[in-house]
Image (cartoon, rainbow, N blue to C red):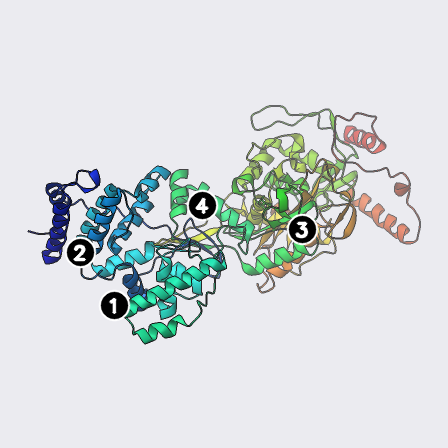
Amino acid sequence: MCLQGLLACGVLGGLLAAAAALPVVGGVGITTKSVARTFTDLPPSPRENPLPQRTVLLDRNGRQFAQFYTENRTVVPLDKVAPVMGQAIVAIEDSRFYEHAGLDIKGTLRALVTNAQAGGVRQGGSSLTQQLVKNILVENAQTSAERAQARAPSLRRKIIELRYALAMEKKYSKAEILERYLNIAYFGAGAFGVEAAAQRFFSVPASKLSLQQAATLAGAVRTPYATDPSLDKQRRKRLRERRDLVLDRMAQVGNITQAQADATKKNPLRIRLKPEPGGCEESTYPYFCIYVHRELLSNPVFGNTVAERERRLARGGIILRTTVDPAAQRAAQRAISSRVSAADTEVAAEAMIEPGSGRIRAMAASKKYGRNSGNTNNGPRTTYNLAADVAHGGGQGFQAGSTFKVFTLATALSRGWRFDQGYMTPGRFVPDWGYVDCRHRKVNDPNAEIFNASGEGTGGPYSLSTGTWKSVNIFYMMLERRVGLCRVVRTARALGIARADGAPLREVPTFTLGVNEMDPVTVAAAFAAFGARGRYCRPMAITDIVERNGRRVQVPPDCEQTIDRGVADAVSHILSGVFTKGTMTGQSIGRDAAGKTGTNNGYTSAWFAGYTPDLAAAVSLGDIRGSYRYPLRDVEIGGEYYGAVQGASLPGPIWVSSMSGALRDVPPSSFHRPDMWRFGGGHTPGLEKDEKDKKAEEAGRRAGRRSAAERRTVEPGLYRPHLRGGENRGYREWRRWTRDHW
């Protein structure tokens, strides 16, 4: 029997007739006998891989803010395409589409004879089904050589297309073939498929296309580059000529009247090109977008191998609902942009994370994302994801400074320390004994001297609370030695702390002073754990994935109780005092909040990290050209002069402003009260007398008298490696006190 009744018999008969007229076609050996065999022993229809489509990113409210694609395409069913579009494409590309079984005999015979006489392909005669086959073979090609072969102007390729076309006609109905063609065809201006083309050319869905619009798109398919309306006026002129040709052809085949065609041809094209930005540079939230993109390529949740994840992203067609909160994002960006200019070499970055889930609510930076003109390194733009680590597109990060004291604090509380427990501290400290890393190696540094940061405490008696509120470096160096360096490192690791550059943490005596380079996302996630009562959650940016088949996959939070709840509550209790009795006194967000400033050695960078039960955030500030070469001294940032930037002078206000805005519509939550039976009390020798003296000193200062302490004040320093010298008076007093009391 013939293939598909009379239609298939007609195809075969036509080919046999052509073969009889041309015993050897074009010298390729296609004889009457071989033609019969070629078109009766058909292969299966060509393999159809899922067509590349857009991957769309939605914010937490369901609004799109970015998209990725290798081909701008949205696959739609035929019932979502205006009928006039199907009529237009059939009229101009294959007017006998509904009459043949994959091969337009008249057109093919005409082209076959012409091409055979010319010794190559000079005239087209492909049916719509053959064009579909060609597009499928091009899409399936894995290499440039395979793509070139699929497009090669040869008789052999045409024969392959014919065989596949006949096979497809056996497998699919005409409506199914037309639907596949409309979704795979390239229309120009970067639009693949009729839905993307309708949106790109006219800013309407394919279901709303008018006669004039459908004829325009149908006219673009044959030569999409020569009629691309996004390029120049000349191409638009060619596109209009093609549109008019389609309208005349539609009238000839009876889809419309000639009067309708003539009336429509009088109209201009009315192209309304809709931008279809792809990638993160044109996203509303570029830094968060980069984080999502890198997460898709690096997280095994989205594919077992990197190659599999890359293929999945390239094919697209998925919808990602993400965690970004537009209100929080706006608040963070405004807080930064109002204080740090994009043109400044000093850069500020902030990440906001929800305690108890790890959901990233905002990622903002002072510079715009993208390349500077001339690809210069310094300018208002950057290609580094300033709020993230290297794995998510970021740079090397900045030393986190005194924000790391929180890990020593939590370790001490877990070891039984109480709020008012403390000891006398000197004005200078050398970490020459007692420090052992997690590989049981002594890491003492007898060549280093530690001083307290300017404005963050002096020598004297400090308790766990006052030492934290005043951010006393030497108190924390001594505390770290007492509780154990390795225990502090383990606490930090349990809270997700890892260097921004991916290198191992530096387990050195100054670990508690934040010598490791960090990124805001990592630090914010660690602090969020205290807001969630010790429950650490890995930062997450994606909550739901909707596959191209409509299947929805939820991405659950990845959380673990890493800190005892009581300890976390005690940490929050002490860190709350930073706003009322410590380095952030006078700065408040009007609800329960806890946090820690971070000012680094030599003012190389500055931080503030803090949290409420509802939201955590970390702000970093440093010079993008290099924090050691360009410290934050005598600098102008955002039009304001700073003699030296501390954690409370710029990162702190950014944090306060951004958190106030982000939480404006969120009812305030309170921290859990600490277990005073477990953590209350304690004793610090000399602290009560020292506080009385300070009160008297303050009263004297108000009366205009300079205290003795002020008269002998020297320029305070910080961490000074490889610096030797005589002991100062405070250091001698501390040594004498320890000898008498210990």
Say what secondary structure mark 4 lies in: helix
Q: Which mark is residue 296?
A: 4
Describe residue 602's horizontal placement relative to residue 382 as left or right: right
Quarter residue 93 falls in: bottom left
Tag 1 and tag 4, C-beta contact below 8 Å:
no
Q: Are marks 4 and 2 in contact (CB under 8 Å)?
A: no
Relative to 585, does residue 454 appear above or below in the rendering? above
**Distance between mark 4 and mark 2 Cα atoms:** 44 Å
Secondary structure found at label 3: loop
Residues 677 and 167: in front is: 167
Of callouts 3 and 4, the N-terminal one: 4
Seen from the viewer's position, the closer of residues 62 and 616 is 62
Q: Which residue in the structure is indicated by mark 2? A: 101
Single out the mark in the foreground, 3 or 1: 1
Name the mark nearer the viewer: 4 or 2. Answer: 2
Residue pointed to by mark 1: 253
**C-alpha gap between disc 1 and disc 4:** 50 Å
User: In this view of the protein, which residue sits in the foreground, 658 or 422?
Assistant: 658
Depth check, mark 1 against mark 2: the one in front is 1
